[in-house]
Image (spheres, rainbow, N blue to C red):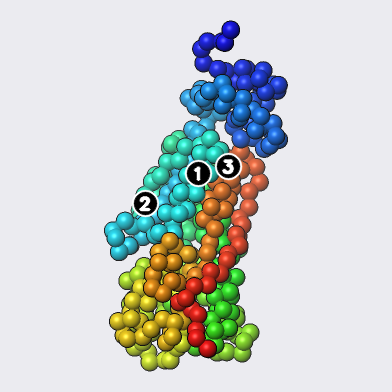
């Protein structure tokens, strides 16, 4: 006769042929349980229609079972205040949390606000993921405050030698090298760079350093007149291209530090009667969904948002479990489309 009532972890242990403590560890995502055993326990739990009692579990572990994602607002053309690149990242982080049995609390913040204090003394979440670009030097003190008071947090961004926190980012330097090498292979020699090339925006700066490195190796001059600061918006890209044209310094290619900057610059080029790529070859960075639909489709550098979400969540969970965690860089991939392909 089938047993009535809600299934327990002891029922799962009996069906899976393991101890109850092994069941508990497996359902918590403990690395001490082998993958084969974890799958057997999960299959038994599914057969018994077992659901974790999060309230009871949290009382035992003093964990909330929730991670917080602080998503920083950006100026955008559609008033969403969310960079499209981070929408993909949001999806991957949400999936990674769900796969590990955690809920995700999403909070929209402005970098100028006291976001470092909002979660400091609460028990809403076991740890925080910080997502969004901004002036790193302006918010670095807030990162130090978070870490200093024991808040477990990881950040998507550049990996820097003196940073106070754990960060996961992409290989921006390599991405800058790959784009510039590709443009040189297309016969371009006067390559402009649109994006803030300073320590305030270390992601953009690393892309610029990769660009400059390849030019120097090719024996070409890195011309300061061909670099214009820009934030990651279409309007900023449009304005930066206008500034570049006003300098009257010739260029035959354009490397934008983000796809949004590149798309805005392409619009400005069209308004000035120049075609892409015949007059100016253009490449961006991020591979947002719009990049493949603009005319012409945009050459760009792809950051693997799925891998990024997994790495961010796993790093944070290691901190929560008081296990060693380190910053790390993920590989990038150059995606070549028509915007950079010159007819030779």
The residue located at (60%, 59%) in the rendering is 330
Q: List x then y, in percent, for residue 315.
A: 59, 47
Distance between mark 3 and mark 1 Cα atoms: 14 Å
The quarter in which the N terminus is drawn is top right
**Residue at label 1?**
95
Say which residue appears at 41% left-offset and 52% top-offset: 71
Residue at image point 49% right, 33% down: 64
Q: Verify CB contact (< 8 Å) between mark 3 and mark 1.
A: no
Report the side of 99 relative to 244 (left or right): right
Q: Please tell me which of labels 3 and 1 falls first in the chain.
A: 1
- Which is closer to the viewer, label 2 or label 1? 1
Q: Which mark is residue 109?
A: 2
Judge the density around disc 1: few (<14), some (14-19), many (≥20) Cα neighbours within 10 Å: some
Give the spatial CA distance, label 2 vs label 3.
22 Å
Secondary structure, mark 3, is: helix
Residue under numbered circle 3? 317
Provide the secondary structure element on which disc 1 rests: helix
Q: Is residue 32 visible?
A: no
In the picture provided, is 257 more to the left or to the right than 312?
left
- Of labels 3 and 1, the one closer to you: 1
Query: What element does badge 2 sit on?
Result: strand
Residue 64 appears in view: yes
Residue at image point 56% right, 62% down: 170
| Number of other residues with Cα within 10 Å of mark 2, as a class: few under 14, some 14 to 19, many 20 or more | some
- Marks 2 and 3 close (CB-CB < 8 Å): no
Question: Percent x, y for residue 17?
Answer: 71, 21
- The image shows residue 200, relative to residue 251, as above or below, that is above
Q: Position of residue 42 (x, y in %)?
A: 61, 29
Q: Residues within 10 Å of mark 3 (few under 14, many from 20)?
A: many
> Which callout, 2 or 1, points at the residue further toward the start of the chain?
1
């Amino acid at each position: 006769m089938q047993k009535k009532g809600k299934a327990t972890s002891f029922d799962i242990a009996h069906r899976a042929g393991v101890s109850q403590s092994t069941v508990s560890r497996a359902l918590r995502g403990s690395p001490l349980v082998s993958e084969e055993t974890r799958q057997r326990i999960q299959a038994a739990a599914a057969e018994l229609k077992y659901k974790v009692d999060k309230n009871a579990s949290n009382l035992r572990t003093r964990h909330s079972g929730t991670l917080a994602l602080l998503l920083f607002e950006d100026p955008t053309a559609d008033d969403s205040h969310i960079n499209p690149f981070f929408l993909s990242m949001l999806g991957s982080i949400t999936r990674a949390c769900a796969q590990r049995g955690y809920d995700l609390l999403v909070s929209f913040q402005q970098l100028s606000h006291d976001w470092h204090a909002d979660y400091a003394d609460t028990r809403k979440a076991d740890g925080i993921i910080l997502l969004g670009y901004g002036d790193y030097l302006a918010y670095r003190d807030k990162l130090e405050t978070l870490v200093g008071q024991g808040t477990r947090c990881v950040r998507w961004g550049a990996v820097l030698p003196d940073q106070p926190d754990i960060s996961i980012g992409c290989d921006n330097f390599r991405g800058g090298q790959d784009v510039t090498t590709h443009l040189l292979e297309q016969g371009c020699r006067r390559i402009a760079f649109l994006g803030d090339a300073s320590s305030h925006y270390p992601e953009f700066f690393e892309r610029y350093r990769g660009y400059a490195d390849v030019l120097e190796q090719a024996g070409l001059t890195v011309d300061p007149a061909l670099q214009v600061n820009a934030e990651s918006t279409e309007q900023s890209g449009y304005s930066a291209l206008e500034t570049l044209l006003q300098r009257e310094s010739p260029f035959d290619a354009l490397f934008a530090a983000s796809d949004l900057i590149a798309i805005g610059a392409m619009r400005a080029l069209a308004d000035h009667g120049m075609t892409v790529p015949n007059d100016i070859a253009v490449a961006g960075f991020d591979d947002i969904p719009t990049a493949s639909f603009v005319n012409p489709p945009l050459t760009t550098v792809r950051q693997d948002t799925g891998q990024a979400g997994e790495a961010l969540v796993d790093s944070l969970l290691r901190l929560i479990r008081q296990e060693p965690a380190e910053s790390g860089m993920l590989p990038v991939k150059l995606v070549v489309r028509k915007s950079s392909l010159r007819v030779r």
